[in-house]
Image: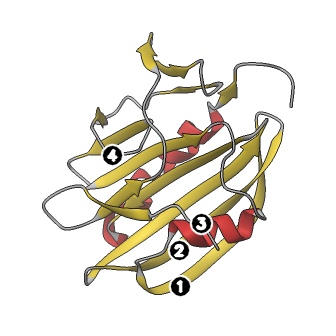
């Protein structure tokens, strides 16, 4: 039996765009411009320009920019995140989207750990979406980072997601 994370499926605002619904619960806190989750072993700088914290079932951290209708989220499954190769785990995030077109997929390093960065377009309930995900596994945890926006505003806010990813730190030095 294949287990899967429900993926990009929780409704998040007036335009019907979807965000993250992943297994897990929020255990972190915001401290001096960072979101820190000691239990799941990471910290990440919160974006500043126009992003607000929001609730999203199953996400450890969820943010929205109401001007662009963009969303960011982090969900960590610790311990025992779903098994399998990262490309398969990435596909599970996009279950429920229609007309999916993969734009790119490449390996990345986040704080010295290899992950998979994927960008797609698709439709959720008939609404076009542009999604970027970074999936990484470390020390028995599976980390899903997502950025989703309407195609027309994706480019304007994608630098914020780049900065978010680049600020990622694991709290212990062991891989």
Q: Measured from the top left, where is residue 164 in percent x and y?
A: 54, 37
Image disc number at residue 3: 3
- Circle nearer the N terminus (2, 3): 3
Residue holding disc 4: 57
Q: Nearer the viewer, mark 2 or mark 3?
A: 3
Q: Mark 3 or mark 1, which is nearer to you?
A: 3
Contact check, label 4 and label 1, Cβ < 8 Å: no
In 3D space, how far apart are the residues under numbered discs 2 and 1 (Cα atoms)? 5 Å
Q: Give the labeled residue for mark 2.
A: 120
Distance from Cα at disc 2 to Cα at disc 4? 23 Å
Neighbours of disc 3 within 10 Å: few (<14), some (14-19), many (20+): few
- Dot 2: within a 10 Å radius of its alpha carbon, few (fewer than 14), some, or many (20 or more) residues? some
Label located before the other in sequence (2 or 1): 1
Give the quadrant of residue 78.
Answer: top right
Nearer to us of marks 4 and 3 is 3
State whether residue 147 is above or below residue 101. above
Check the image and name the residue furthest to the left.
14
- Closer to the camera: disc 4 or disc 1? 4
Disc 4 from disc 1: Cα separation: 26 Å
- Which quadrant is home to the N terminus? bottom right
Q: Earlier in the sequence, mark 4 or mark 1?
A: 4
- Observer-nearest of 44 and 36: 36
Q: Position of residue 11 (x, y in %)?
A: 24, 60
- Please name the residue shown 56% across and 58% down the image: 133
Toward the top, the furthest residue is 32
- In space, the residues marked 3 and 1 are separated at their CA atoms by 23 Å
For image coordinates 42% across by 42% down, the residue present is 59
The residue that appears at 49% across and 19% down in the rendered structure is: 34
Residue annotated with mark 1: 101
Does dot 2 land on a helix, a strand or a loop? strand
Q: Does 144 sit left or right of 53 as displayed? A: right
Looking at this view, name the residue that lies furthest to the front.
Answer: 1
């Amino acid at each position: 039996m294949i287990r899967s994370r429900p993926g990009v499926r929780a409704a998040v605002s007036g335009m019907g765009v979807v965000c993250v619904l992943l297994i897990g619960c929020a255990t972190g806190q915001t401290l001096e411009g960072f979101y820190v989750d000691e239990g799941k072993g990471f910290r990440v700088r919160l974006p500043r320009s126009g992003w607000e914290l929001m609730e999203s079932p199953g996400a450890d951290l969820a943010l929205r920019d109401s001007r662009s209708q963009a969303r960011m989220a982090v969900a960590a499954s610790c311990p025992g995140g779903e098994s399998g190769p990262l490309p398969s785990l990435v596909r599970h995030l996009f279950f429920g989207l229609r007309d999916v077109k993969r734009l790119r997929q490449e390996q990345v390093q986040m704080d010295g750990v290899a992950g998979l960065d994927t960008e797609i377009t698709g439709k959720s309930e008939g609404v076009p979406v542009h999604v970027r995900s970074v999936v990484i596994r470390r020390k028995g945890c599976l980390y899903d980072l997502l950025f989703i926006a309407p195609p027309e505003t994706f480019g304007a806010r994608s630098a914020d997601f780049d900065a978010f990813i680049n600020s990622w730190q694991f709290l212990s030095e062991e891989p």
